[in-house]
Image (cartoon, grey):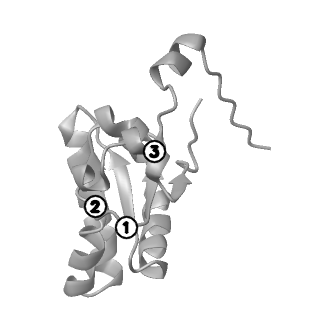
């Protein structure tokens, strides 16, 4: 049976102190409208298995007004590889117009905004089949 354990150290808790809703950055900071519902991927880009691409594809298809936020890596080639892989998967399963529309709802956001993005997310997504440690 798969188990995923998270251990929070006091220093980590202090860095991620809760914020009041009024102190959060507006969603427009991340390229989203204020009424946008979005899911945020909790894991790192390099952990995103190709099986996850299919899940993202179906999430975007089933929620036409939703977006998916990806926390971008500082090593930019990983972001590009992931985006290109998504684009390839989407192209294999949709029309060019639909691929462009689905990809327009993927947002890469700087790690500096992680807390704001996480606290305003409608849904969080874990990185199956590889979870955090």
Mark 2, Cα crowd under 10 Å, few <14 / some 14-19 / many 20+, is some
Image x and y of residue 22, in percent: 40, 44
Question: First in sequence: mark 1 or mark 3?
Answer: 3
Mark 1–mark 3 Cα distance, whole angstroms, equals 16 Å
Q: Which mark is residue 32?
A: 2
Q: Position of residue 111 (x, y in %)?
A: 32, 35
Residue furthest to the top: 11
Whether residue 8 can be seen here: yes
Left or right: 56 in relation to 69: right
Q: CA distance from mark 2 to mark 1?
A: 6 Å
Measured as percent of width and height from the top left, residue 53 is found at 42, 62
Depicted 131 relative to depicted 91: above or below: above
Please state which of residues 117 and 101 is positioned toward the viewer in this rendering.
Answer: 117
Q: Which element type, helix, strand or loop, lies under badge 3?
A: helix
Q: Residue 113: x, y in percent?
A: 32, 38
**Residue under the point 59% across and 29% down:** 133
Q: How far apart in space, not on screen, are marks 2 and 3 (Cα)? A: 17 Å
Q: Quadrant of residue 97?
A: bottom left
Q: Nearer the viewer, residue 74 or 130?
A: 74
Q: Which residue is mark 1?
A: 36
Q: State the residue at coordinates (57%, 50%).
A: 128
Does 89 sit left or right of 49 as displayed?
left
SS at mark 2 in the image: loop
* Image quadrant in which you'd find residue 116: top left
Structural crowding at the residue carrying mark 3, measured as other residues with C-alpha within 10 Å and reported as few (<14), some (14–19) or many (≥20): few
The answer to whether one can see residue 49 in this image is no
Query: Which quarter shows the N terminus?
Result: top right
**Which residue is depicted at the point 30% across and 74% down?**
102
**Residue beneath disc 3:** 21
Q: Do tag 2 and tag 1 residues touch (Cβ < 8 Å)? A: yes
């Amino acid at each position: 049976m798969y188990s995923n354990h998270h251990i929070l150290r006091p220093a980590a808790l202090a860095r991620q102190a809760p914020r009041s809703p009024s102190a959060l950055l507006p969603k427009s900071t991340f390229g989203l409208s204020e009424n946008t519902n979005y899911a945020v991927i909790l894991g790192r880009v390099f952990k995103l298995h190709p099986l996850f691409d299919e899940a993202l594809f179906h999430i975007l298809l089933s929620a036409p007004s939703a977006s998916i936020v990806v926390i971008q890596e500082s090593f930019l080639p990983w972001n590009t590889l992931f985006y290109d892989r998504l684009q390839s998967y989407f192209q294999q399963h949709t029309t060019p117009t639909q691929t462009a529309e689905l990809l327009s709802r993927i947002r890469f956001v700087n790690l500096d905004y992680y807390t704001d993005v996480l606290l305003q997310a409608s849904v969080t997504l874990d990185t199956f089949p590889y979870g955090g440690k």
